[in-house]
Image (spheres, helix red, strand yellow):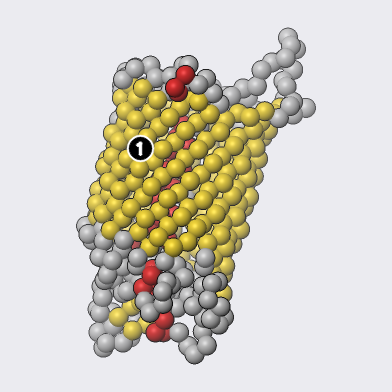
Amino acid sequence: MRKIYLCVAALYLGIVAAHAQTKTLPVKDSSNYQARKLKIDEINIVSAYYHQDGNNSAVTGGIGTEKLTDFANTFDLQLSKYGVGGNKHTFTFELGVDHYTSASSDKIDPYSVSSASRQDTRVYPSLNWTVSNDKTGNAFGLTGSYSHEFDYQSFGGGINLTRVSKDKNTQFDFKGQVFLDTWKVILPVELRPPGYGSGSDRDGRGNVDHSPRNSFSTSFSISQVLSTRLQALFIIEPSYQHGLLATKYQRDYFTDGSERVENLPGSRYKLPIAVRFNYFLDDHFVIRTFYRYYMDNWGIRAHTAELEIPIKLTSFVSVSPYYRYNNQQGTRYFAPYGQHDPTAVYYTSDYDLSTLHSNFVGANIRLSPPTGVFGWQHFNSLEIRAGHYMRSTGLNSNIVTLAMKFK
């Protein structure tokens, strides 16, 4: 369940990243002295509503409802000033708040009025500082973040580095991140030892164990202007996780009729490799293509291809239809309900880790009039994005996103 709505968060937050811009502060005199007063560059507000339904809930062993709704909101504020050496210092504060309801998670304890994770709110603030040089384009930055939900809390830190060639045609970016998480080990009601708690802060029924999960990720990318119309981007993102990687309130059922909680290895290596091409056909059409190959040491292999064609209807109105296809070979630890080998060491019935293929189709419309949206000069742009997701396992979902930028 969590994996799904975190991916949703990544989807709509990507809208902000796709259209983020910075504004150069005014020159005060002929000596190119830059103003050193902290100034608001832009404000972004993004809201998304997500709904899904299916019949392969991992909480109940691969069967049962996957119905879930998520209402997610992010607010980010970007400020900047110029330092003594002429470098630009940019400070970005972001606050995210998600609220979800999950019918499948309510089955952790079906005998209670409401189990600990039937609904919850996730809060995740972050702060980034980046110093950049307007002339060279080079930049360096640091990020700190925090996230809290009913069964975990996370502290994060990161570093980012940008280097641009002298002719401005080549750019190299590096990002490194670490997340140090602590999980409540919540168990299905029938598999709890005597005196073991539910994990809910509201009922106080006994204590639960806590386990760490640490994640380390890097991203290396190089973008290249190949011609006046064609740009390319190559990305490699190796990562490593260690700790509690299984979701212990998800059940697994075996061929001998026994039942256990999900068990997966305590470490995981991931290696996504991607390439993107943007072709500027003319003043009205851009063709954006994307391909990614994914592999990990759990045996998952996946191919993802995406096509988006922004169409500029007027100087300030554009429409972008898009389509994404994914084909995944599942982990060797997966088996459907009641089909696990009793002698297996690791096992899961989470269909997110199974062999599957999916389609995601949608479109977005963006308004960015020179006089501002609705005539408000500081209301820089308004974007509405809608998409429909279809998976071969029977899972279907819809998402609608609203993004507003103020400058």
- Quarter of the rendering containing residue 6: bottom left
- 167 vs 68, left or right, is right
Left or right of 159, for residue 33 = right
Please name whichever residue, 344 or 181, is drawn nearer the observer in this view of the structure.
181
For the C terminus, give its image quadrant.
top right
Residue 23: image location, x then y, percent: 58, 24
Dot 1 surroundings within 10 Å: few (below 14), some, or many (20 or more)? Answer: many
In this picture, residue 209 sits left or right of residue 229: right
Q: Is residue 136 above or below residue 353?
A: above
* Residue 209 visible in rendering: no
Amino acid type of disc 1? Arg
Q: Which residue is mark 1?
A: 385
Q: Position of residue 274 (x, y in %)?
A: 39, 44
Query: Does residue 100 lie above or below 95 as drawn?
Result: below
Q: Which corner quadrant of the image does residue 400 belong to?
A: top left
Q: Quadrant of residue 309?
A: top left
Q: Residue at x 61, y 42 (%)?
A: 93
Q: Residue at x 56, y 74 (%)?
A: 210
